[in-house]
Every structure is written in structure tokens, then in C-alpha cells.
Amino acid sequence: MTCQFATYTTRCAEKLRQDNLLTGCFTVIMRTSYYQKENQYSAARTVQLDPPTHDTGRLIQIAMQLAEMAYEPGYDYLKAKVIATELVQADEVQGSLLGGPVHDEKRARLMATLDQINSKLSADAVKYGAMGLAPTWGMRSEHFSQRYTTHWDELPLVTIE
């Protein structure tokens, strides 16, 4: 499940950077299946971020800590989520007299370089090790509806005899 959290957190951070946003609050949620009668469990852990960030490395570290706090052994987890809230524009962050620096230029350049490489090559050309080498999980897609209006190859064919 840690690979899922790392992957979801990476995608979340990429989207934050695309929109020039920082997150001030980060939440991790995990749960078992709704449909099993016994042994159900769900947990959510949240942390306030000061200063707000869109740094993938920092967010993955936070997600792993939150997931470890929420984890209870003995359950078959089915779903994992990450949620970024309290979003602020990256250029409108209020600094704190007692807090550390709001913006780390080296980390910002690193994130920009990662995004640039991944946009040119592939989504995971360069990635954090926490995401794993090859995902051992995947989205279940056996019940998707057809996409007639957006994919030509899924249009139904009509034959006249």
C-alpha cells in the first residue's frame, strides 16, 4: 500500500505545481472493502503543513508517516487516498516569524527539472524510489462504460445485410 500512497502523492504534487499551488494541509485515507461483512476498517490522518508545499519528496515523506500512523495490522486494505487542502497560490504565501524559509530555491529547481523530464519522456521516467520499480497494483477497469463520444475505436459498428 505504501507504493500506492507514494504514487498518488506524486500525482497530487505534480498537479499542484501545474496550477502553481501549495497545500497547507495533507490527508491520507485507507480503508477495507465496504462489501465484506466482518473485519472492516478505515482510517484517516491529517497534518497541517507550515510552510505550505508542493514538494513531492516532502509530501511523500509526510504521506508515509501518516499511513504508518493509520495502519492497523490484520486488515486487507482495498483503497488508499491522499487529499491536499488549504490550497494557496505559490506566490502569495505568508511567511512566519518563527517558521523556516517559505521557499527553497534548490528544491523548486529540482521539482521543475523532474516535471520537465517526465513531461518530455513519460510520466514516471524519473521517480522516487518509494513508488517502486513496477507497480504491483492497478486500477480495476472491468466495469467501465464505453466512451462512444470521445474514442473512435469504441463506437459501435452497425452492419446492414
Image (tube, grey):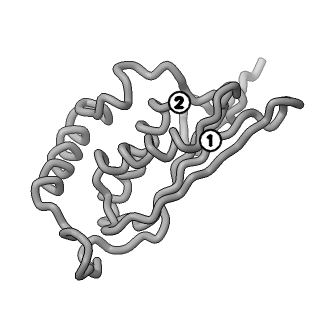
Left-right relation of 142 to 93:
right
Residue plotted at (34% across, 20% down): 133
- Residue 52, placed above or below residue 108: below
Graded by Cα atoms within 10 Å as few (under 14), some (14 to 19) or many (20 or more), the crowding at tag 1 reads: many
- Rendering coords of residue 61 (x, y %): 36, 44
Could you tell me the amino acid type at mark 2? Met
Residue named by callout 2: 1
Q: Earlier in the sequence, mark 2 or mark 1?
A: 2
Q: Is residue 102 above or below residue 119?
A: below
Q: Nearer the viewer, residue 123 or 126?
A: 126
Q: Secondary structure at mark 1?
A: strand
For this rendering, which residue is in front, 14 or 75?
Answer: 75
CB atoms at circles 2 and 1 under 8 Å apart?
Answer: yes
For mark 1, what is the residue? 30
Q: Position of residue 74 (x, y in %)?
A: 69, 25
Alpha carbon distance from label 2 to label 1: 9 Å
Give percent across and percent down for residue 128: 29, 34
Neighbour tally class for label 2: few under 14, some 14-19, many 20 plus, Cα within 10 Å: some
Left or right relative to 52: residue 115: left
Quadrant where the C terminus sits is top right
Question: Quadrant of residue 93 in the image?
Answer: bottom left
Residue nearer the viewer, 31 or 143: 31
Inspect the image, locate mark 1, and give the three-letter code of the amino acid beneath it.
Answer: Met
